[in-house]
Amino acid sequence: MNERDEIKWIRNIRLFGSKKDADLLIRSYYDEIYRYAFRQLSGAADAYDLTQEIFISVLQSIKTYKKEQASFRTWLYHIATNKIIDHRRKKTPQTIALDEIEAAADETDFVKQLGQSELLYLIEVYVSCFPLNVQQIYRLHVYGDFTFAQISLSLSLPEGTVKSYYYRLQKKIRKEFYDEYRDVIGG
């Protein structure tokens, strides 16, 4: 896919409500956005459902997209990030009974695996308490593999500010979780 095709598809969706062009646009980004959601949610079903919601929202608001302000991909990730943050706010944590978890071959691996799952969950909860722009920076960098320059463009923030917010949050995460999870972290 090239940018000219993307612009043509967006124009046809806006002007004619073209389902064919909407399908082409969605197909070109679907797997990427699904992976982005999957890496942040509790399972494939949640990621699938949220990916659907993201693209519904994109199509409903496509008339507000301005190519002069950001690439479509950047605009799409902005919507996806906000949807994921909203989803995480609403979602109550799910618990899994220990007897439902397959026994690991080595008990220390099992304990470490549980510790990692717990740590990741706690970090997600912790990050969710920060202002929206800090959450966006964290999620785009960690889960979306965006560079600081790309995040800067996406959020209309200076790159130095983006880096500062990200590294301050990383420092706070380490301070908050290092002592309790030293074995899991590997320190």
Image: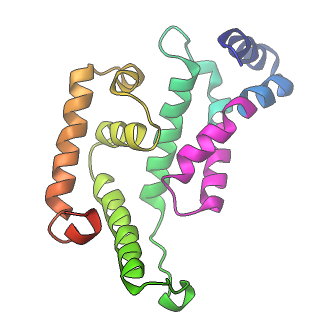
Asked where in the image residue 106 lies, by quadrant, the reply is: bottom left
- Please indicate, yes or no, whether residue 56 appears anywhere in the rendered image: no
Q: Is residue 55 above or below residue 70?
A: below
Exactly how many numbered labels are in the figure?
0
Q: Is residue 79 left or right of residue 28?
A: left
In depth, the one of 64 and 169 nearer the eye is: 169
Colour convention:
rainbow
Q: Is residue 102 above or below residue 14?
A: below
Q: Is residue 72 left or right of residue 4?
A: left
Q: Position of residue 85 (x, y in %)?
A: 44, 48
Is residue 35 magenta-colored? yes
Q: Is residue 71 above or below residue 106?
A: above
- Rendered residue at 38%/37% (across/down): 141
Is residue 110 magenta-colored? no
Q: Main secondary structure of the magenta part?
A: helix
- Rendered residue at 41%/73% (across/down): 113
- Rendered residue at 16%/48% (across/down): 171
Q: Which residues are magenta?
A: 27-56
Extreme-right residue of the structure: 20
